[in-house]
Amino acid sequence: MLKTSFASLLAIAVATPALAQTDNAPDKDAQDKIVVTASRSGEGIPLENLPASATVIDAQQLDQRQIRIVSDVLRDVPGIAVSRTGAVGSQTQIRIRGTEGNHVLVLIDGIEAADPYNGEYDFGTLIADPSARIEVLRGQQSSLYGSDAIGGVINYITLSGREAPGFSARAEGGSFGTVSTAARAAGASGAFDYAVSGNWYHTDGYATARGGSRNVGSDNVGATAKVNWQAAENFKLSGVLRYSYTDAETNDTDSNPASPTFGYTIDSPGVHFTNEAFYGLLSAELTALDGRWTNTVSGQFSDTTRKNYDGFGYAYGDKGQRYKGSFVSSFRFGTDAIRHRLTAAVDWEREQFQNTSPPSPYVFTGERSTDNLGLVAEYELTAGGFTGGASVRHDDNNRFADTTTWRVQAGYRLPTDTHVHAAYGTGVKNPLYYELFGYADGKYIGNPNLKPEKSEGWEAGIDQRFLDGKATIGATRFDSTLKDEIYTTYPAPNFVATPGNRATDSKQHGLEVFATLQPIAQVRIDAAYTHLEATEDGVTEVRRPGDIASFNATLFSKDQRFSGTLTVRYNGRMDDLAYTDPSFVPVRVSLKPYTLVNLGAQYQVIKGVSVFGRVENLFDVKYEEVFGNATPGLAGYGGVRLAF
């Protein structure tokens, strides 16, 4: 049924005619340098003038690096560490600047995408769309978005029909029995534009257990529909619908204390999970006073269902929904030399969740919910080379204590084309459902008295442009403190896991460095490096490499028909936890550093038809990014793409 539905979706996408591109289509190069996530006003801010740390990964970068799994390209962003537990489709966490995975707010086309039950978004379920861009905003952003944005915000944006009109289709195959397809139809005509896309990624996988023989594979499906209608000169309606489905095999950890592999990942036939999610957003925007006053009302939802299976059938699961309504009013005033913008926003949100595990004395299977009302005020100023602003948010929550968060930031571009910037902000993260109310098997007991985690921190940076803006280098120093961190304790005498709030502070500080260079149309180079020190009471926190670096170089032929991309990614030494002690208390282990090299190329055979191929892990490096989980070796992929 699933495959039939997906095939039907692709057929619709193929059959839908691409409307002609209108003359007033926006400048794509300019659009790629705009950040919309950094302000609640809805207006984009030029990346070069943004007084906060941000990275934009544009559609061309995604294409040239042949990204199929979105989390892979996030490894190229300063400050980001990626941890995938197993093969493609397995749980994948993103940590920004040493914070936890659930400290990162994830938006997909402006929709909050985190699983309401688990409290974070699983990037293992996100397959790259044919035309998209990614904005990563680092640092505390709770004053704009509320809970979850302690480490920052990742906004994954599919392009509209006006931004990227036309039809495209792609098919590829390769190592580990991998088959991937995607199709997109988009266009614009007059006041209307649309984009419909779908993708499917299948892999037989590889053995993730040390010395194991069971290949762990997955099936991933995604589909998006996006429409905009400029009903009047000052009135616009927009809508987004998105669907994703993942069926991923996994391996369990050996839980028999008498076994020589106790605590290690072992072959686990029949063990897998499914994750199905629906997302939607509808917004209406009304402008007045010659476009200087914008009012937007929107409603959105997300609905996620996760089911876990063992060798005997359904074992446990959960489901959650989020409903959110927002009203944003933004007023712009001043002169060409000095521009002000005031923004006010009201966010109402309800999260509801339920444990759907089979009856057990350890689990509550009733439905619970949390309501939150957020009030936001933001001021932004641009005056010559100066940009700055401040924001404050108050959250009235029916389950936790009310919270007020704030942020100030400023930047200035000197006549030497040197940009200096600094910011200070606070953040908050509410406890997760399973942290509050327990789990299913009696090995973890919830704590309904948990307090929200709170963070505060600063950053200061400088970047320098060269060659008339064709080259930029920059560096940012950051420092954050997390209070009331939620962690797992193992109190005697039974050593049953339960969460609590730490009495000591967790600290994260480090340095981010980046460089971009595109001196001519035939060369593009992007590089990033992060040094991180993340500790709790002086002890290094796990799954946070001390050093991360990436390098991407793309060369184009003069006629732009051929391109080749070299990607090098370095992940430094890091600690992890191993449950190899019969007391079930974790043991700290060290994972060795590794460097991965990918090489890709593509060639336009005739207009609209291209062939491509890539090699991943070129030197067949053996490594672990999560303890006990083997990773893929040398792999090759190739395919064909149509674009009209």
Image: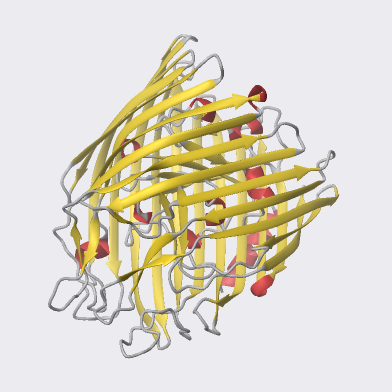
Residue 566 percent across, percent down from the top left: 69, 51
Relative side of 189 to 583, left or right: right
Relative side of 150 to 214, left or right: left
Residue shown at 30%/76% (left/top)?
A: 357
Residue shown at 59%/46% (left/top)?
A: 132
Residue 635 percent across, percent down from the top left: 67, 68
Residue shown at 54%/49% (left/top)?
A: 549
The furthest residue to the bottom: 258
Comparing 627 with 593, the one in front is 593
Colour style of the rendered protein structure: secondary structure
Q: On the image, which quarter does residue 169 sit in?
A: bottom right
The answer to whether residue 201 is seen in the rendering is yes
Residue 35 percent across, percent down from the top left: 50, 34
Tell me the quarter of the image containing the N terminus: bottom right
Comparing 99 with 9, the one in front is 99
The answer to whether residue 111 is seen in the rendering is no
Residue shown at 63%/37% (left/top)?
A: 163
- Count of number-bearing discs: 0
Residue 475 percent across, percent down from the top left: 48, 34
Relative side of 295 to 360, left or right: right
Relative side of 408 to 10, left or right: left
